[in-house]
Amino acid sequence: MPTVDLSTFKADFRVKAHHRFRGDCIEGAVSYEFVRDHVEWLPKIGFNSYMLQATSPYVWYAKWYEHQGNPNKPAEPLSTEEADVITDKLEADIHRCGLQLHSIGHDYMAPAFGLFGKNTTEEEVDQKGIREYLALINGERKIMKNHFRYTNLCFTNPIARQKLAEFFVKYVTEKPEVDFLHIWMADSPNTNCECEECRKGNVSDQYIKILNDVDQAFSENGIKTRVVFIMYNDSCWAPVFEKLKNTDRFVFLSAVRQDYISGYTNWDKTKELPPFELNNNTVPRTDFILNMSFLNEWRKNFEGDIFFFEYHLYSDHYCDPGYCQISDRLMRDLKLLDDIGVKGYMHCSSPRKSMPTSYPMYMSGRILMDPTLGEEEISEDYYSAAFGKDWRKAYTYLRTLSELFNPDLVRNTAVGAADEMFNKNGVEIVLPYMNNPEALKDFSKIGDVISDFESVIAENIEHPEACVRKSWDILRVHAKIARQLAEGLCAGAAGDMATAQNICRKLVKFLQEIEDDYVQEFDLHLLYRRLKVTFGFTSNVFSSVKEDI
């Protein structure tokens, strides 16, 4: 920390951000301290907002405090009251750091009807007398997948909508610090009401009714909070009959999703939209051209601000151990936001993703502030500060790793699709790197590249500056992880998946052992889940880490 005499110190720095929305959203396994430190960093690199999902981000806290995926650490059960205390502290931290607070998204339907918990039973539904408000599907009104998160309501029922509106009024009245309230639908497609009234129009028609009711309730109560609605799953189809009555209240969020390869490069192409069929949505979630075609239809109904909600750094970065390919593509996509006609971007990501560097987030903030900046300028700024005099060697090394690891051969471009979410172990997965002699040639070079670079790490590991010293120590541990990962990929590329999976098990054990020492650098929960996909244990990137490999 540099020290100056503040009585004589004066500085003036002014910059106007290019994009209106520059945010990150809670994900992964997090503690209070992880998120607090992250939100203190975000405005320093150009971000202006942070989202705490759900009325309580309990599920993300619990993943950490229960230490899911690490048997070496005893679980620390978290009560709902303790989770609420964490949330209150984080909301204060977010505003203290000058960030705008985005809140809720999914998971409001249960508390709106007096329920809370990771699961809701049918008995609880009957005890609360709320079955009549649930979506009618195949002749039954019931909780989907045992959780309100995946359950929609009968949105043409005016009492159901009234209860939601009353809940949101109460929520923002008690939390006036919420700048943007996100109102999303259930986090699962094909869970919509099939009653006679709900069949009139499509899902978005019913969605607009909720939004208009909330807006009216807010206006009656003098509430200025902005509302964010989303194009996601079944709300991809624009409404047929309904329109927002007060567009000034609303901001439109598009959960774009794409294959992380071609990205937004085809933003100006269009596809014919498939017809809407109630509860028969089979649209691939990673088809960006189709998603843009849906978005263009929505633009005919809504002319307000639009920004993107994306998943580049959810877990896809774990396919790219050098973090360079993912950064290049993320920069490419961010530079296309103006062409697409949207006003910003929100990551859905864990705050714990700086192994081997924090460059992807750093670059994102810089580009969202000023998209005229180039890769060379930003990378020199970042790497020289992080690694000192040998920064070019570190930069070249990580670029080499990104190239040799061939991330596109390790990706499953379908794992972002919601219909993958509930696949179970035993569903066969085949990735392009498996039994691939050409991939084996590159994977086989990685060990030597790491060995050659270890002398550079040794020369810098005792650097006098703490920041630089830490950066090189991260590379030291990252080299061990990358070496084991390469060995596993080599086995898989040679067609020996049994050996590949055994190497994966050893790698997971190593990660569990070092987690406490590098707890800010990688999110074991998300990395573990991604490794299970990479090595063919499951086709589900959302698979529980509680399921052993």
Image (cartoon, helix red, strand yellow):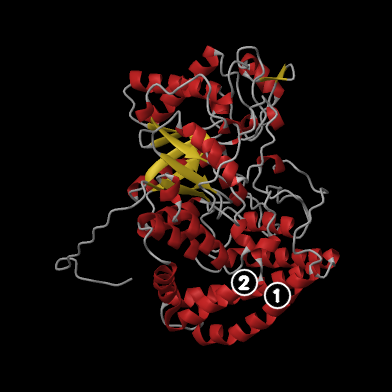
Q: Tell me which amino acid carries mark 2.
A: Glu
Left or right relative to 118: residue 297: left
Determine which of the numbered discs, if any, sits on residue 404 in the image: none
Q: Position of residue 266 (x, y in %)?
A: 54, 50
Would you call the spot at circle 2 few (<14 residues within 10 Å), some (14-19), or many (20 or more)?
A: some
**Residue drawn at the location 83% of the way across and 64% of the way down:** 497
Q: Position of residue 4 (x, y in %)?
A: 23, 71
Q: Residue 212 lies in what quarter of the image?
A: top left
Residue designated by label 2:
403
Label 1 with label 2: CB-CB less than 8 Å: yes
Residue designated by label 1:
442
**Residue drawn at the location 43% of the way across and 39% of the way down:** 306
Does dot 2 land on a helix, a strand or a loop? helix
Whichever of callouts 1 and 2 sits on the residue coming sooner in the sequence is: 2
The quadrant the C terminus occupies is bottom right
Q: Position of residue 211 (x, y in %)?
A: 46, 24
Q: Is residue 126 visible?
A: yes
Does dot 1 land on a helix, a strand or a loop? helix
In this view, 421 is above or below 239:
below
- Identify which residue, 454 or 4, lies in the foreground: 454
Q: Is residue 54 visible?
A: no
Q: Position of residue 363 (x, y in %)?
A: 44, 62
Q: Of all residues shown, which one is farthest toward the left? A: 8
The quadrant the N terminus occupies is bottom left
The Cα atoms of the two marked residues, 1 and 2, are separated by: 8 Å
Left or right relative to 173: residue 454: right
